[in-house]
Image: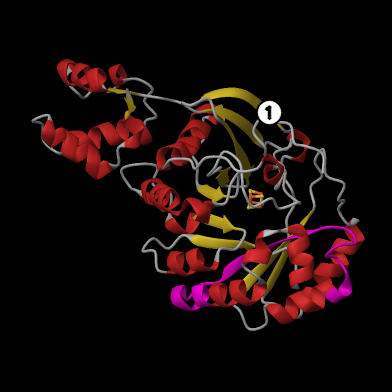
Amino acid sequence: MTDIHSLTLPELEALALDLGWKPFRGRQVYKWLWQKRAAAFEEMTDLARDARALLAARFRVFAPEPVSRLDDPDGTVKLSLRLEDNAIVETVFIPDADRRTVCVSTQTGCALGCVICRTGSLGPGRDLVWHEIAGQVLETGRRTGERITNVVFMGMGEPLLNYDNVTRALVELNHDHGLNIGARKLTVSTAGIPGRIREFARFPLQAKLAVSLNGADDATRSRLMPVNRRWPLAELIPAVREFTEVRGKRVTFEYVLVAGVNDRESDALALAALLRGMPCKVNLIPFNAFEGCDLTAPDPAAVEAFRDLLLPRLPAVTVRRSRGRGICGACGQLAGHRPPPTR
Ligand code: SF4
């Protein structure tokens, strides 16, 4: 039986007409699902009993089952969620001041194999459908009792390789009859798919873009991110520049610092030269270790030295305080429940 969450608002309105109701009934159901987090049709008390029975005969209200929940002392929560086909994806809740951010997965594995990322060691998985992506936000809100304010598409998978479902999820997350999360509070993070970046620049919803860079020359970047061999910097950077021009907004570059690989003075200077003139922010992330990977993070002094080289040369540079490291919920540490192979 179909999960009713898979119907968008226009589809629910069409269903209402189909059932001989007024279209606003469709909106009511949508609000029950996405705003009031209803887990059963019986909860939809402003629908007549026979209307609820009619829906229950055709649909079910599915909620992903949390197979584990890990709480970090810093407030970060990692949920492992079982989907209808038993696939498991990880979702992370990150509270910070007045922000309540959820980091969602978009695929059940990842074909891109970045060596700095635990998901990359899983290999390819399937694409998540839009409501499985948005459903992670719903379930996290339900499990933590919080109103979610921000969503980052930085969990398992490459969002721009699941473009249609990701953009559909963005629209539904933004909908004011649904979770109502502002477009500028939605961020899609990519390993760098130039054609999709250009397409996303023209997508009507003005969600933000983050690009995982991690190297300022092709040799270094390809070592950490094999996707760079397919789409090298000479193709990626012009696409990102075009994004900033079309949108008139800056982008964020994520740069995971790995000791002895991409943290030298020459790397910082090459990075500043590569991004010269681009409206951007560089987010430095000391590498988060995971089992099966022998890379290490630079010491804090080296991170500061790298940042200090960039600061006078680029518009904005920050060092990200990694959250949820104790529960393997930090950047690059998500991997469902499959143990990663040793590399
Ligand atoms: S960093 Fe992103 S694109 Fe790279 S392997 Fe991990 S999930 Fe895939």
Residue 226 percent coordinates (x, y): 70, 59
Count residues near mark 1 (Cα–Cα under 10 Å), then give few for <14, some for 14-19, many for 20+. Answer: some
Residue 56 percent coordinates (x, y): 26, 19
Residue 297 percent coordinates (x, y): 86, 53
Tell which of 302 and 36 is nearer to you: 302
Tell which of 340 and 323 is nearer to you: 340
Decide if residue 33 is in sight here.
yes
Rendered residue at 72%/48% (across/down):
117
Decide if residue 253 is in sight here.
no
Tell which of 170 and 89 is nearer to you: 89
Give the colour scheme of this rendering: secondary structure
* Disc 1 target residue: 70
Identity of the amino acid at label 1?
Answer: Leu
Q: Is residue 63 left or right of residue 280?
A: left
Rendered residue at 71%/53% (across/down):
114
Q: Is residue 34 above or below residue 152?
A: above
Tell which of 73 and 336 is nearer to you: 336
Magenta stretch, residue numbers = 242-266
Q: Is residue 278 left or right of residue 17?
A: right
Q: Secondary structure at mark 1?
A: strand
* Residue located farthest toward the front when viewing the structure as drawn: 230
Q: Which quadrant, please, contains the C terminus?
A: top right
Rendered residue at 61%/65% (across/down):
252
Q: Which quadrant, please, contains the N terminus?
A: top left
- Residue 165 part of the magenta-drawn span: no
Residue 83 percent coordinates (x, y): 50, 28
Quarter occupied by residue 261: bottom right
